[in-house]
Image: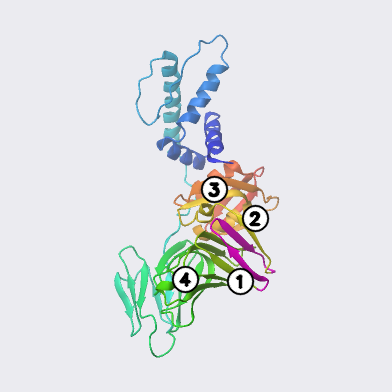
Amino acid sequence: MREAALYKKLVERYIEKKLSSEELEVFYHLLDEGKLDNYILDAMDEDIAVIPEKPKVQLHRFSLSKVIKISAAACILVAVGVAFFIRQTKVSHESFVQIEDKAPGAQKATLVLGSGETIDLNNAPDGQIRTSENVSIVKDQDGRISYKGKRDPSGGTDAFNMIKVPKGGHYEISLADGTRVFLNAFSTLTFPSVFTGKERLVKLTGEAYFEVTPSFKAGGKAFVVETGNQKVQVVGTSFNINAYTDEPYTKTTLLKGKVNVLTSAGTTKLVPGQQSSMDFKGVTTVANVDPETALDWKNGDFIFVNESLRSVMRKLSRWYDMDVVYEKGISDETLSGQISRNKTLSQVLQLLSLSGDFNYKLDHNLLHLYPNTKAVK
C-alpha cells in the first residue's frame, strides 16, 4: 500500500474515532506537515455529496496549518467542525499512556586494530586518534574516520583492521586509497590499513555502499569485496552489497561503472541499474532494478515493494536493535510503502500495521507480532 492509501485510511479511521494512541501520534505529525489536508477535504467532499438536495459548494484546497478565509458559508461550517473535532480529540490524546518505544539508529561503531586494540569510535576524540609508520587514523568533526597512509610501505603488509557497526548503528569510513564505505546496521568491514598487494581486498558481512577510487589512482590495483561465497571485482565505481547472513540472497546493486561478480558458478557482469542475487547454493540471477530502492537505507528511508513481513522485520530488527517473535497464526504477508528511518519504532510499526494484517507489542527488546484479530494485552 502506497502512502496515499495509508493517509486515506488514517483519515477514515480518525473520522470513525478508531485511531489508537500511536496512530493519533502519526496522524498529528502528518497533519502538522500538511500531508493530510487533501484527504481530509476529500472526506468532507464525500459527506456533502451524500446530503440530498444540497447546493453544490466549491471546496478550496488549503493547508489546515494556516488560517485561510473561505467565502462559502457551508465550507466554513464544515472546516470549523473538523477543526473543533481535531482540537477536542487532541486534548483527550494528551492523557494517553505512551507505549514502550525505541529511537531510530545512530552513528556508532567499534574499530579493532591489527594489534588487537579496540577503539570505541563514539567516544574517541576528533583529530588523529592513532598513528604508525605507515598510516594515520583521523576522526573528523562529523564523526567519520579516514585512513591516511603510504601506498606501498616497506616492511611487508600491514595487519588487517576491522570496523564493527552494531544493531541500531551506521558508520562511514574512508580507506587509505580514498574509497568511501558507508556501513549499514549490524555490519562488519575487514580491511588493511594500507593496500600493499596486487589488489585492494576488503571483506564484508552485512550491508555497505562503496564509492571506489578508480584503479588508475591506486597503482592499477582492482578493488575486490569478498562476501561469503562471492567476490565483487571493480575498477572504479559505485555499488551496494547486501550480504547479511540471515538473508536468503546476497544482493549486489550497481549504480555506476561496472563490476564483475565472481562465484563458484562463474562470473556475472553488471551494468548500472542491474542487481545480482546469489542464493545459498551459489546460483546467481540478474534483474533490472531501481538502484535508489537498494540505497534506501543510505538515503534515510525504508522502501518496501511487495516485501514479505519477515523481510521487513529483519530490517527493522537491525535498525532498532531488537528481536522479533512471531506468535501463532501470523501470516507472512507482503507490504509496500516508504517510511523515514528517522521515525521511532512505534511510528514505523503503526504505519505498517495500517497496510498489513498484524498487531504488535514491544516488550523491552522483544517485538511480538500477532494476527490482527487477536487482542494484545
Residue 276 drawn in magenta = yes
Q: Secondary structure at mark 1?
A: strand
Other residues around mark 2 within 10 Å, as few (<14) / some (14–19) / many (≥20): some
* Residue 230 visible, this angle: yes
Colour scheme of the rendered structure: rainbow
Mark nearest the camera among 1 and 4 is 1
Q: Secondary structure at mark 4?
A: strand
Relative to 294, is 120 on the left or the right? left
> Residue 366: in sight, yes or no?
no
- Looking at the picture, tell me which residue is in the foreground, 203 or 23: 203
Residue 12 in the image, given as x and y percentages of width and height? 55, 31
Alpha carbon separation for disc pair 3 and 1? 38 Å
Residue 187 in picture, x, y percent from top left: 51, 67
Q: The disc labelled 3 sits on which kind of residue?
A: Leu
Which residue is tagged 3?
Answer: 349
- Of tags 4 and 2, the one toward the viewer is 4
Answer whether labels 3 and 1 touch (C-beta < 8 Å): no
In the image, residue 35 lies at what x, y percent? 45, 36
Pointers 4 and 2 in contact (C-beta within 8 Å): no
Residue 80 higher or lower than 283, as above or below = above
**1 vs 2, front mark:** 1
> Does the magenta segment cover residue 265?
yes
Q: Secondary structure at mark 3?
A: helix
> From the viewer's perspective, is residue 56 above or below residue 33?
above
Q: Earlier in the sequence, mark 3 or mark 1?
A: 1
User: In screen coordinates, is 364 left or right of 328?
Assistant: left
The magenta-colored residue range is 264-281
Q: Nearer the viewer, residue 109 or 263?
A: 263
- Label 3 packing within 10 angstroms: few (<14), some (14-19), many (20+): many
